[in-house]
Image (cartoon, helix red, strand yellow):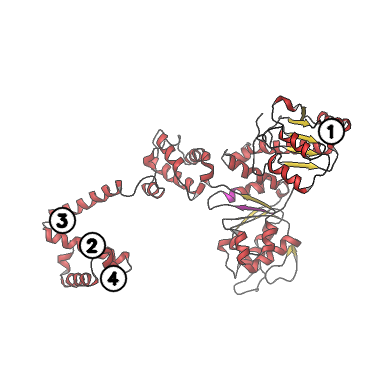
Amino acid sequence: MSKRQTPGGSLRVEAQHRLRVALDARLSPAQREAARSAARAHEQLKIVETADQQPVDVMVVSRVDPTGLAALASLGPLPVGGRVLVCCEVPPVRRALEVLACAATDLRCGRPIGEMLAAVAERACREARIEQLLDTPLVQDNLCGHSATWRAALREVVLATHGSRAPVLLLGETGTGKELLARLVHTLDEQCGRGELVVVDCTTLSPELAASELFGHERGSFTGAVGARRGAVAAADGGTLFLDEVGELPLAVQAQLLRVLQEGKYKSVGGTHWQAADFRLVCATHRDLEAAVAQGSFRADLYYRMAASVVQLPTLRERRGDILPLARRFLAECGCSEGPDALMQTLLEAAPFAGNVRELRQLMRRAAAAHGAEKGPVSVGCLPRAWLVQAGLIEYGSADEVSAGAEAEDVVRRWLEDGLGLADIEERAGEIAIRLARAMEGGQVGRAARRLGVTDRALQKRQRRQSETAPGQRDG
């Protein structure tokens, strides 16, 4: 079975894959028997000879010295899934770093060989289950995508969720799916079965009312507080609190949120009694929070508290293999029986998508509306021309100039039919140009004149002449 390499180099295995374990020739008989006993007890482990030129997932050595490093070097390059080094003795730090730099992705040492190999096998089983979970309808029906970068992000979310209620911080550009991943965290958290997912958009919180929105308030605690009100923290008790764009949270409220995370209790605005709160915190932002900490606009203690697990979401540009599957899915959601045609597929794959998945979704909705009830695949003509220009896929002007020229011809034709001569047509066109230029420049004559390519004096003279002309002569 195949294996996948993920950021950080941790070992990933498919279900039923057996880890190939090589034994250093310098191991004592007792050490070799301990390794073989562990392999017999765990079906994920298989003792192999290194001479068969097959990738080795685990190497057991007595010590990491020049001879041990030479044995590692003889194994060749790292396998796709990474390699674990099991060492009977704890190596010096410098030597351990040398190993991790080139010969292994994980180093286990200082415990009995059987225990260390059992731990490696247990991790392999756990990660195989995670790989299976990523392919279930629970994930794929809500978070479509099979690209390596996207699966890596999903994998990190699952790892952060299982066995812990520590906060999760989701980083990524706007439109990358941070709220969808927050919902996945809530869904996978077995301890959140009795609570709700409460979403708070921190960009909408004013400094004056932010504390009330999060922690609630008592009657009369401030002007307009005609009654007591529960906050988001109370609503999320037993569930998940998702703070979207947490980088916008006012500093004064950051200190109160930190207390809740540290002590599990809070006071409502105007309240005198502490209230307990038990929830998982998930935060998301497109901002560089470390830079915000350095600038003093975000508390360092809160940042490190809520960044227990950090997941960086890839942009759509970094997961281009998912563009077409997503496009087909969005079109299907809009009722289209078929996906994009060949030309449209090529254009979608070449587009920058600065707005990421959100931009693609909106684009497919507009394309589906233009496609209507037509049969067959959705063609490139259903894509808005303005989007094609903005995406840099066509140059501005080609078709637009033709369309604008046709409209101008229609206007001049009507004027000619009305009996206007060349001088009258020039006069009317000039009036229109002046009116548009002044509107574009906010009524400033000097800037309008520069846009029209004339002097301020010439423009003012032209306007005086127009004002002296009878309205009936100008309007037509």
Q: Nearer the viewer, mark 2 or mark 1?
A: 1
| Quarter holding residue 305 | bottom right
Q: Position of residue 113 (x, y in %)?
A: 84, 37
Please say whether residue 178 is one of the residues in the magenta stretch: yes
Q: Residue shown at 65%/67% (left/top)?
A: 253
Q: Nearer the viewer, mark 2 or mark 4?
A: 4
Side (left or right) of 442 relative to 466: right
Side (left or right) of 1 relative to 92: left
Q: Which residue position holds label 3? A: 415
Q: Residues within 10 Å of mark 3 (few under 14, many from 20)?
A: some
Vertical relation: 160 (above or below) 25:
below
Q: Which residue position holds label 1? A: 27
* Front-lying residue, 31 or 367: 31
- Amino acid at the residue labelled 4: Gly
How far apart marks 4 and 3 lie (CA) works out to: 31 Å
Side (left or right) of 348 relative to 475: right
Question: How many circles with numbers are drawn on the protein?
Answer: 4
Q: Which residue position holds label 2? A: 432
Instruction: Pick whichever of labels 4 and 3 is earlier in the sequence.
Output: 3
The residue tagged with tag 2: helix, strand or loop?
Answer: helix
How far apart marks 4 and 1 lie (CA) works out to: 88 Å
Instruction: Pick whichever of labels 4 and 1 is earlier in the sequence.
Output: 1
How far apart marks 3 and 2 lie (CA) works out to: 14 Å
The boundaries of the magenta stretch are: 165-180
Q: Residue shown at 36%/47% (left/top)?
A: 385
Visible residue check, residue 217? yes
- Amino acid at the residue labelled 2: Ile
How far apart marks 2 and 1 lie (CA) works out to: 92 Å
Instruction: Pick whichever of labels 3 and 1 is earlier in the sequence.
Output: 1
- Amino acid at the residue labelled 1: Leu
How far apart marks 2 and 4 lie (CA) works out to: 17 Å
